[in-house]
Image (tube, helix red, strand yellow):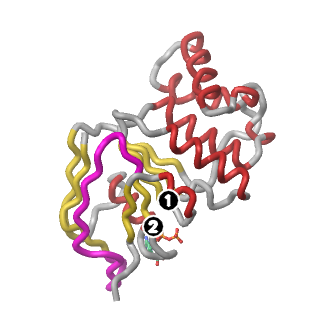
Amino acid sequence: MRIELAAIGHQFADQWLFQGLSLTFEADRLYALVGPSGSGKSTLLSIIASMISPTEGSITFERVDEVFWVFQTANGVPARSAADHVALPLLAQGMDRTVADPIAHDILHRFGLGATADRPFKSLSGGEAQRLMLARAMARDPQCLLIDEPTAQLDRTSAASVTTTLINLRSSSRITIVATHDQSVIDACDSVIDLTPQT
Ligand SMILES: Nc1ncnc2c1ncn2[C@@H]1O[C@H](COP(=O)(O)OP(=O)(O)OP(=O)(O)O)[C@@H](O)[C@H]1O
């Protein structure tokens, strides 16, 4: 399982964000994508997610069928329970509710969210809500997980809990890429990709 970027470059209008980016992403590794605001972290995630095509260069997916994106803001359905949020991707795949619910509860426990299972999304703290988004991603068990600034909206304690959760996402069958400004998240990653423009 591997994603290869070959001489990727991207520009908006006549402004190049980055050029000549050649990178290999492999399973079982956490990658931090860093660089100042506006350096193109989200744009590069969008290219890897095939949401936009790079202006130049190519991207190759080797045994990667599903790329899943966890956004910076935790979006949920206010009145639906935490367990429902994790079960939904399973139900959408056609799984029976009696099978999906125990799996959802198991995932919540693994993410330290067991006590929140029956609580409505609107009652969760910012850190719990962000961890729930990561737990929901796990229900899909994607081969590539893109996470955009998961701790940006959080206080230090909540951010630390999300960072711990991120470490648990490492899997031999997954590539995980996190765009972040948070040094504790960067420290938890195996590799750092720096998009800081060269002068
Ligand atoms: N669709 C678009 N059209 C024009 N310019 C864009 C578009 N999307 C992004 N940009 C610009 O490209 C630059 C890089 O944006 P991007 O969101 O990738 O940066 P980032 O490193 O993720 O920033 P941040 O850390 O603030 O989230 C910014 O200057 C942004 O305004």
Secondary-structure class at tag 1? helix
Q: Are marks 1 and 2 in contact (CB under 8 Å)?
A: yes
Question: Among all residues in the image, which is located at the extreme bottom?
Answer: 199
Looking at the rendered image, the disc whose residue lies closer to the viewer, 1 or 2, is 1
Is 12 within the magenta?
A: yes
- Asked which quadrant contains residue 112, the reply is top right
Which amino acid, by three-letter code, is at mark 2?
Val
Using the image as rendered, state which of residue 49 and residue 108 is in the foreground.
Answer: 108
Residue that carries the numbered disc 1 in the rendered image? 186
Residue that carries the numbered disc 2 in the rendered image? 34
Q: Main secondary structure of the magenta part?
A: strand
Q: Is residue 28 above or below residue 81?
A: below
Which amino acid, by three-letter code, is at mark 1?
Ile
Q: Quadrant of the N terminus?
A: top left
Question: Dot 2 surroundings within 10 Å: few (below 14), some, or many (20 or more)?
Answer: many
Is 2 within the magenta?
A: no
Residue 94 place in picture, x, y as percent? 46, 19
- Image side of residue 149 versus residue 142, left or right: right
- Asked which quadrant contains residue 175, the reply is top left
Q: Which residues are magenta?
A: 11-30
Q: Quadrant of the C terminus?
A: bottom left
Question: Among all residues in the image, which is located at the extreme right?
Answer: 123
Question: Mark 1 or mark 2: which comes first in sequence?
Answer: 2
